[in-house]
Amino acid sequence: MTEILFYITDKAGDGVQTALAWRIAEKAWRQGRRIYVHCGDAAQARGVDEAFWRHPATGFLPHEPAGPEAASPVLVGHGDDPEGHHDVMINLAATVPDFATRFERVAEMITGDPDLREAGRARFRFYRERGFDIQSHRL
């Protein structure tokens, strides 16, 4: 069964969710995992892709937009199920995509922003109602 991990911070503001996603993706990549960062739409995916090149200034995370030719260990996309096998999905969308359970792990980022926090509560209920084992990590 898919392992569900919630990463929770009280920090709020532009870029907090993306910075948290970068941190989780970087850790998973160093463990040899393949990661898919799922975004709510194309604009968010472009923003995350661009932010991953800049954050942090001293870091590096090999990534690229998801697509048929993409080969990086970290893919950023939206909409459809990414092609190929990926171990971890980092969900930055407001809802849980239909294909989430094909991943070994799903990481959910919850920040102090009221809208993101409320959407995170809805995703938590979604997983709990379906019997998933949920782990929470306060950052």
Image (cartoon, helix red, strand yellow):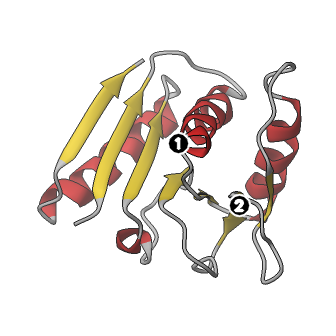
Query: Which residue is at a point 48% across and 56% down the rendered structure image?
Result: 88
Left or right? Give the position of 29 relative to 116.
right
Precedes in sequence: disc 2 or disc 1: 1
Q: Which mark is residue 31?
A: 1
Left or right? Give the position of 2 relative to 107.
left
Up-down: is 58 above or below 52?
A: above
Q: Which mark is residue 5?
A: none
Which quadrant holds residue 85? bottom right
The amino acid beneath tag 1 is Gln
Measured as percent of width and height from the top left, residue 63 is found at: 78, 53
Measured as percent of width and height from the top left, residue 90 is found at: 53, 51
Between 63 and 13, the residue placed more toward the observer is 63
Query: Which residue is at a point 33% across and 27% down the rendered structure image?
Result: 137
Secondary structure, mark 2, is strand
Between 118 and 58, the residue placed more toward the observer is 58
Q: Circle 2 is placed at which residue position?
A: 75
Query: Which residue is at a point 61% across and 30% down the rendered structure image?
Result: 23
The amino acid beneath tag 2 is Leu
Query: Which residue is at a point 57% across and 79% down the rendered structure image?
Result: 81
* Quadrant showing the C terminus: top left
Up-down: is 123 above or below 21?
A: below
Left or right? Give the position of 91 relative to 4.
right
Measured as percent of width and height from the top left, residue 102 is found at: 39, 74
Q: Mark 2 near mark 1, Cβ–Cβ under 8 Å?
A: no
Density class for disc 1 (Cα within 10 Å; few <14, some 14-19, many ≥20) is few
Secondary structure, mark 1, is loop
Up-down: is 23 above or below 13?
A: below
Measured as percent of width and height from the top left, residue 77 is found at: 70, 65
Q: CA distance from mark 2 to mark 1?
A: 16 Å
Which quadrant holds residue 138? top left
Circle 2 or circle 1, nearest the eye: 1
